[in-house]
Amino acid sequence: MRKLVYGMNLTLDGYVAAAGDDIGWSGPPSDELFQWWLDHEQASGLSLYGRKLWETMSSYWPTGDQQPGATPAHVAFARNWRDTPKVVFSSTIDKVDWNTRLFTGDTIAEINRLKAEDGDPMTIGGPTLAGAAMRAGLIDEYVIATHPVLIGGGTPFFTALDNWVNLNLVETRTIPGGVILSRYETRR
């Protein structure tokens, strides 16, 4: 059975984006933060995206390694992004590219089906898609980069839940700039 991992950058007050989908609060990632995310992405065998995150990622990473000033980590991330199989869950997108398939049916049933397969862990991105998986009890691990900023509102990382989810802290450290890198496993 595959593990499902949900991770994103978030503010200290728990948001992934300010009003209007503004993520400017996070600034450009430090080399250490970028490498941390790259390491997590390289451990994934399949990426699950909601529409908004897919549109953001697919607007840059297909050619991210060809951009002026691309660092070795950017080159590695872009190549990994293109090579990793992806599923986009959306009823409003007509077409996807770059080793990606579109899924328009029952999201939870499909995530359960994918989890039941053998393979490397899957990452899930986008708070709406991940929120559905969270409410269904499908998230096995949370990977969080908490930035020292408060924005007071926007798109939350965590969704409203019907039941508590108990977690075990697996990893935590602080990197320059006061960003706290944490990893939690769901207690079952």
Image (cartoon, rainbow, N blue to C red):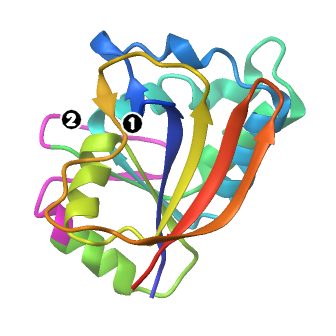
Q: Amino acid at mark 2?
A: Ile
Q: Residues within 10 Å of mark 1 (few under 14, many from 20)?
A: many
How far from the left and from the top, in percent, is residue 162? 13, 63
To which residue does mark 1 refer?
54
Q: Is residue 141 magenta?
A: no
Gap in Å between the C-alphas at discs 2 and 1?
A: 10 Å
Q: Is residue 95 magenta?
A: yes
To which residue does mark 2 refer?
93
Count of numbered badges drawn on the protein? 2
**Residue 114 shows in the view:** yes
Q: Are marks 2 and 1 in contact (CB under 8 Å)?
A: yes
How far from the left and from the top, in percent, is residue 95? 27, 38
Above/below status of 11 relative to 20: below
- The magenta stretch spans which residues? 91-108
What residue is rendered at 71% in x and 55% in y? Answer: 172
Q: Amino acid at mark 1?
A: Trp
Nearest to the observer: residue 165 or residue 101: 165
How far from the left and from the top, in percent, is residue 84? 58, 56
Nearest to the observer: residue 98 or residue 20: 20
What residue is rendered at 41% in x and 85% in y? Answer: 117
Q: Residues within 10 Å of mark 2 (few under 14, many from 20)?
A: some
**Residue 79 shows in the view:** no
Above/below status of 46 relative to 94: below
